[in-house]
């Protein structure tokens, strides 16, 4: 499946960072998501039941991130990717999380990861 859905510039405030001042005040992170989706089937019937509900995916991501209290963007990205893969049974996800103004003279800093759903082994 090569068709994809993407969500860009999803802004969420959360506690993120290692410095004491970062632990006291919520900061904005910006999230971009991309994942394979059954576009043809949904388009053929024009029915949400055949589509991935990207509104629910965005809401789940927003709630997960808003409640999180990680020190590292790497941890936030990894945990969010795993949560979305499990919850929505996505085959894979490309996730980019950036933290605006984290570094002086830079627009933002961030991490980008690609993860796939791990299949359970039969034993």
Image (spheres, helix red, strand yellow):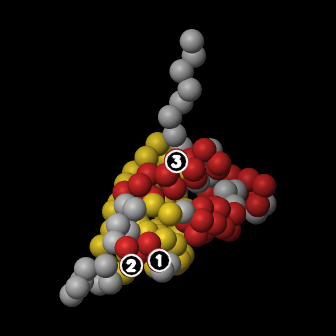
C-alpha gap between disc 3 and disc 2: 28 Å
SS type, badge 2: helix
The answer to whether one can see residue 22 in this image is yes
Tags 1 and 2 in contact by the CB under 8 Å rule? yes
Drawn side of residue 72 relative to residue 37, left or right: left
Q: Name which quarter of the figure residue 60 lies in.
A: bottom right
Residue lying at 46% horizontally and 42% vertically, measured from the top left? 116
The residue tagged 1 is 24
The residue tagged 2 is 21
Where 70 falls versus 78 (above or below)? below
The residue tagged 3 is 82
SS type, badge 3: helix
Q: Earlier in the sequence, mark 3 or mark 1?
A: 1
Drawn side of residue 52 relative to residue 79, left or right: right
Residue lying at 56% horizontally and 26% vertically, measured from the top left? 120
Q: Residue 110 at x, y = what percent? A: 33, 68
Residue lying at 23% horizontally and 85% vertically, measured from the top left? 104
Image quadrant containing the C terminus: top right
Where 17 falls versus 114 (above or below)? below
Residue lying at 68% horizontally and 52% vertically, measured from the top left? 41
C-alpha gap between disc 3 and disc 1: 27 Å
């Amino acid at each position: 499946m090569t068709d994809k859905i993407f969500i860009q510039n999803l802004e969420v405030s959360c506690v993120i960072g290692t410095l004491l001042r970062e632990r006291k005040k919520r900061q904005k992170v910006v999230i971009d998501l991309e994942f394979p989706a059954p576009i043809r089937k949904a388009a053929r019937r024009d029915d949400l039941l055949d589509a991935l509900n990207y509104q629910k995916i965005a809401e789940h991501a927003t709630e997960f991130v808003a409640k999180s209290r990680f020190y590292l963007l790497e941890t936030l990205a990894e945990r969010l990717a795993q949560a979305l893969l499990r919850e929505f049974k996505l085959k894979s996800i490309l996730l980019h999380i950036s933290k605006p103004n984290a570094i002086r003279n830079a627009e933002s800093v961030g991490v980008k990861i690609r993860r796939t759903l791990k299949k359970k082994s039969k034993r």
